[in-house]
């Protein structure tokens, strides 16, 4: 009986650890939120190399004259900031908690910074990361079930 309790507690701790693995990402890592030297490819490449999930945090860090505005896909594509989602943030650092599986679009509204490539799309909860989470949860549950029934 005691071994089953210990096993159950171990399983609960593993499940809690798997569910609590939210990550923090700094936009463009050490370069920060700035006008990229080769245009938007820097932000596209950076974002493509990440697996953003619900409850992750994305941090925009900058020096100099920049800001961050969340916008619609249409406004992102045209670098328009007249209909921002929320307020334009002018103080660095700015942290964004990813709370849904929809893509989110951010631009710098200063001068022509967006047109020079200072914009990023965050694709959240891709099918592959969701499938990996479901599969790992199922595998842990099956392992715990087998362990508890074997004791």
Image: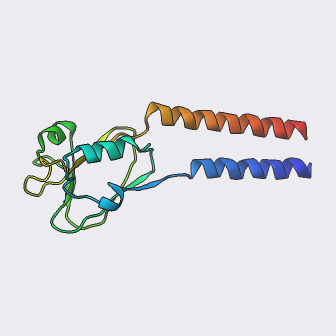
Q: Is residue 12 above or below residue 130?
A: below
What residue do we see at 27% from left, 67% from top? 92
The image quarter in which residue 132 lies: top right
- Residue 139 percent location from the top left of the image: 69, 35
- Residue 117 percent location from the top left of the image: 18, 47
What residue do we see at 43% from left, 35% from top? 126
What residue do we see at 83% from left, 39% from top? 147
Q: How many labels does the image show?
A: 0
Left of 42 or right of it: where is 35?
left
- For this rendering, which residue is in front, 100 or 79? 79
Q: In this view, does 50 lie above or below 26?
A: above
What residue do we see at 18% from left, 55% from top? 35
Farthest-out residue, front: 38
Left of 142 or right of it: where is 127?
left
Q: In this view, does 112 lie above or below 127?
A: below
Left of 13 or right of it: where is 147?
right
Residue 105 visible to an observer of this rendering: no
Looking at the rendered image, the quarter that the C terminus falls into is top right
**Figure colour scheme:** rainbow
- Residue 131 percent location from the top left of the image: 54, 32
- Residue 127 percent location from the top left of the image: 46, 31
- For this rendering, which residue is in front, 46 or 61? 46
Residue 115 visible to an observer of this rendering: yes
- For this rendering, which residue is in front, 94 or 47? 47
């Amino acid at each position: 009986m005691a071994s089953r309790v210990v096993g159950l507690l171990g399983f609960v701790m593993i499940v809690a650890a798997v569910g609590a693995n939210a990550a923090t990402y700094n936009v463009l890592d050490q370069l920060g939120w700035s006008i990229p030297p080769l245009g938007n490819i820097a932000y596209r490449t950076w974002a493509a190399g990440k697996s953003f999930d619900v409850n992750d945090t994305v941090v925009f860090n900058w020096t100099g004259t920049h800001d961050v505005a969340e916008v619609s896909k249409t406004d992102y594509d045209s670098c328009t900031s007249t209909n921002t989602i929320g307020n334009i943030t002018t103080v660095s650092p700015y942290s964004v908690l990813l709370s849904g599986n929809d893509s989110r679009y951010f631009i710098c509204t200063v001068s022509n910074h967006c047109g020079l490539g200072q914009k990023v799309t965050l694709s959240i909860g891709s099918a592959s990361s969701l499938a990996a989470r479901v599969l790992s949860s199922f595998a842990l549950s099956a392992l715990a079930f087998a362990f508890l029934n074997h004791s």
